Amino acid sequence: MKLNKKDILKALESITVPGEGQNMIESGAVKNVITFGDEVVVDITINNPSLQAKKRTEVDIMKTIHDKVYEKAKVTVNVKVDAPVKPTNEIKGNTVPGLQNIVAIASGKGGVGKSTVTANLAVTLSKMGFKVGVLDADIYGPSIPIMFDVETERPLSVTIDGKAKMKPVENHGVKVLSIGFFTKPDQAVVWRGPMAAKALNQMIFDAAWGEIDFLLIDLPPGTGDIHLSIMQSLPITGAVIVSTPQKVALADAKKGVAMFQQDSINVPVLGIIENMAYFTPEELPDNKYFIFGKEGAKNLSEDLKVPFLGQIPLVQSIREAGDVGHPVALQTATALEQAFEEITQNVVQEVVGRNDNLPPTEAIKITTMAGCSSVKN
């Protein structure tokens, strides 16, 4: 039997599109009908993306053609889904007056030197003329107070517009707040997620930060509650991932990048820093020993198509300087100072690019000119 296209269209008028009031012809869901002898091909587009809706549409068309046109017809149904795009439920933070650029410093695993990098980035930014703050969000292992030699300090209470606020502790030109200020050195912080989130919100919104060009947030290792709480609380300008070159660290760093790039989070990854990249003994200054592997983080940045911000060597003085609360980047005319300067300039440059190409989260733009950085209204 030779099928007729008009008969097919007439039969399809008796079928309602799943989730819609009109029949398939009136709604325009049927895009094309091709007949060839006893064969018929129906192309249809529906808005319901569920598998059940697709199967029901296919079965209804085949059954209707068999019942109303020709019971032995060879029917092919091509169902295309054209569901309307739903707005992404992005995590949006609340702005804090005075905080211009908020950069999260993260790592997939512990022990890669994330806090050390945070401290040295902060003092380098301060040396470059920026107003800098550090929020130690590593609730269960706060180390920033030690690295800034303020572990015995306590934030003072000040009154701002009739409200009591915490005044951050300041040293080396950097304002610091940490949960470590509110616990004893030998006291373990045994808190559930909501308690930790509440403490962090107090340090963010009940603090007198003043005018800050860069607030660096030292996040705990991994991807968990604290990270989500921070990103729900603040509009993060971008994230920096710290990793060592070894395979185990890189696997976790990759997860850290993926977390920030999720549609619901959508925080730009400014780049990856490779810490403990190589070891050079004093007696062999021209030698490099790649103890944890060679350029693993650099290769990862290329694979993930995120910027590589630079390398930091494995040097004893970095650890010693952090232990005595005097970050090594404060030293002048040293190779380590230069390394941190280059990395910090790369971070600033990435923030510039991020603010130029994406909706800004700050009122002040950063500009870089001839290797110098400045903040402009």
Image (cartoon, helix red, strand yellow):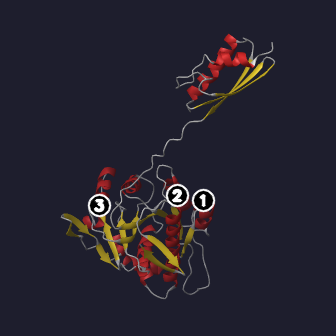
Name the element at disc 1.
Answer: helix
Reply above or below: 138 against 148: above
* Mark found first going from the N terminus, 2 or 1: 2
Q: Which residue is mark 2?
A: 257
Say which residue appears at 76% left-offset and 17% top-offset.
4
The image quadrant where one finds the N terminus is top right
Task: From the top left corner, tell me how far across and down residue 87 is, in percent.
Answer: 48, 44
Q: Which residue is mark 3?
A: 205
Crowdedness near tag 1: few (<14), some (14–19) or many (≥20) residues, C-alpha within 10 Å: few
Label 3 vs label 1, nearer the camera = 3
- Do the residues under discs 2 and 1 have CB atoms within 8 angstroms? yes
Q: Which residue is mark 1?
A: 304
Query: Tag 2: residue type?
Result: Val
Task: From the top left corner, tell me how far across and down residue 144 is, in percent.
Answer: 36, 70
Task: From the top left corner, tell me how far across and down residue 93 is, in percent.
Answer: 38, 55
Give the alpha-carbon distance from disc 2 to disc 1, as whole Å. Answer: 8 Å
